[in-house]
Amino acid sequence: MAVRAVRGATQVEADDRDQVLEATRELVSAVLDRNDLRSEDLISILFTATPDLVSEFPALAARELGLGDVPLMCATEIAVPHALPRVLRLMAHAETPKERGDIQHVYLRGAVALRRDIAQ
């Protein structure tokens, strides 16, 4: 079984705790569903948020989904002047039999603009 990285991102309308948690739950769920992953397949998830999002840790949403035993970390994206605002990103590392080319990276809401080439 290989270790693969799965990327994903979503955008929220405002720096609002409920919006951050809802959007992160949606993103994590979509990453797991589209890649046939279960919590026991996950090695870790790194979450980042643009500097304009400070109302809540995105990792809390993953904990609320039952990923209590998966190592999670949150960080701030670098403040690039032309970057898309209010974006939550994740990189999940998982064990999966899928080939690298079969991994489905997930870009939701306004974050589709980040990777139109691979957005699902």
Image: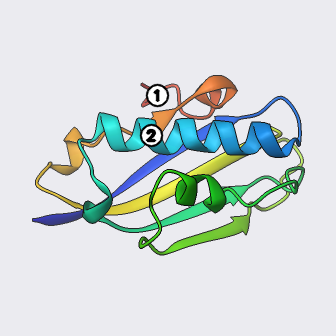
Task: Give percent across and percent down for residue 66.
Answer: 45, 57
Q: Please, what is the three-letter code of the amino acid marked with disc 1? A: Ala
Residue 118 found in image quarter: top left
Q: Is residue 83 visible?
A: no
Task: Give percent across and percent down for residue 114.
Answer: 62, 34
Crowd class of label 2 (few under 14; some 14 to 19; many from 20; radius 10 Å): some
Residue at 74% x, 43% y is 20
Q: Is residue 81 left or right of residue 84?
A: right
Secondary structure under badge 1? loop
Q: Which residue is more in the foreground, 108 or 71?
A: 71
Residue at 42% x, 73% y is 69
Give the quadrant of the C terminus: top left
Residue annotated with mark 2? 29
Task: Give percent across and percent down for residue 97.
Answer: 10, 54
Q: Please, what is the three-letter code of the amino acid marked with disc 2? A: Ser
Which numbered dot is residue 119? Answer: 1
Give the quadrant of the N terminus: bottom left
Secondary structure under badge 2? helix
